Amino acid sequence: MNLDYIFTIVGLIIAIIIITILSSIFPKFILGIIIILFIIVFILNIQELIKYTNKNILVKSEGGNIANYCNLAKYKIFNYDILVDNGNLTLFILYLILFILFWSNKIATDILNNSSNSEIKILGFYKYYNMDVYKNYNYEYECIYAIMLFIALSVIIYGLNLIYYNFSGLNKKENEVIENINIIGALLKDNINISYLEFYLEKIEENFKIDDTFIDKYIDDIQNEKNNDKYKKEALDLYNSNINKFYIKCHITHLLFNIDSKNVIDKNIVTKLTDSSKNYCIFDLISDKNIDAIFPKHMEINKNIAPNKKIISKDIDINIINNMYIDLVNTLKTNYYNVRKYEKNNLFYYKIDLLFTKFSGVLFSIFAIIFLIKTEFKQIIKTLFNITIDPLEYTIYNYGNIFKIIIIIIFLLFISLLFNS
């Protein structure tokens, strides 16, 4: 077995021991951990909904329907490759931890007693939620049980999703998608001139004129003897050794980041592209764009690059550049449309996932956070902030129907937006 798995298991055991000790010292500690877990669940789910809404409803970008294929990854367990979506895997792990915390005592009690019981106790927490205690007002028990059912269903759904994709043959298609995205990422990374992009970012902030002298200014910049920048040195070496490749990289960068528009782009894009620890998905550069408009079938020599004296003074070959461009664009579009074709075939299931797992995850995580804070931390809030929180029974009795109506309206609105976009 790989040592990484051993270290992970040991780390989890140590974490459980530490949490158990702290829970015995601080009774509310485990609830704090649970609230943090639900906050993470909320953030992950809301990010997916915002990403889809922004691309397809607000911006209505060309490639807006493309799902998070950059999240796809392979994990090797012994000699078997497991294909997973990193986002869904993270949610599965979070729900699994919550399942252990919420269900361990109930499952153990039911097995030992050989019958179901009406008592709920969160692992590591002193309080018992017992239906017999409240007779006519079992709100706490019913709320905690609803949260438990949601957690159990989430574990089952995400677990089945993992099994389904890896044992039904569907992972073969997604493996192809991963390969397509990797090819696109490598292709773009190899043909983006980082120093040219950096120069543009610097000059656009200075309101520098982007005209037919821009490339000359850039070449002057990389030829500066005082330059110690890694990417400028690489660009200068390429300029001196392979002017055709230098031109094509400037041209692709010019098109990809729409430099002619003189728009201010993400200032952190260079860091994202060059810092391997960030795990930035280069495919995102084109995932929401019309690549036919960006990269026409036949190359149009860019007027801001080609005529410059520092380019034409070199031994530039237009035919070589055209052939390089055609090969690059053909490879890019072939792989891009393979991803788009797969995405179109799975778009319905992607929307169903957003509706029934991500949307419900947002609602239930908010519900769980509010419930736990309202029932278990009201005295702390009263002491620290002098804010009195109404009893749970009072809130449900007075506002329960309003909350239901709001949730139904939001649910119907989201369905409408989702399936009309």
Image: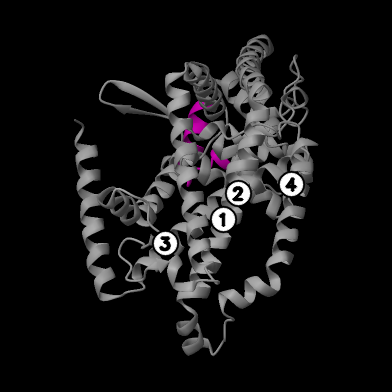
Magenta stretch, main secondary structure class: helix
Q: Which residues are magenta?
A: 221-238
Residue kind at label 2, given as amino acid type: Ser
Where in the figure is residue 166, as x and y percent of width and height?
43, 23
Disc 3 + disc 2, Cβ < 8 Å: no
Q: Amino acid at mark 3?
A: Ile
Q: Earlier in the sequence, mark 2 or mark 4?
A: 2
Please indicate whether residue 247 sits to the left or right of residue 293 in the image: left
* Residue positioned 29% across, 54% down in the render: 109
Image marks 4 and 3: residues in contact by CB distance under 8 Å: no
Secondary structure beneath dot 4 equals: helix
Q: Which mark is residue 34?
A: 3
Residue 50 is situated, as x and y percent measured from the top left of the image, at: 66, 49
The residue pinned by badge 2 equals 360
Going by the numbered disc 1, the residue's amino acid type is Phe
Residue 4: x %, y % from top left: 23, 38
**Under tag 2, what secondary structure?**
helix
Number of the label disc, if any, that sits on residue 364: 1
Pointer 4: what residue? 414
Q: Earlier in the sequence, mark 3 or mark 2?
A: 3
Give the alpha-carbon distance from disc 2 to disc 1, as whole Å: 6 Å
Closer to the chain start, of discs 4 and 3, is: 3
The image quadrant of residue 353 is top right
Q: Are marks 2 and 1 in contact (CB under 8 Å)?
A: yes
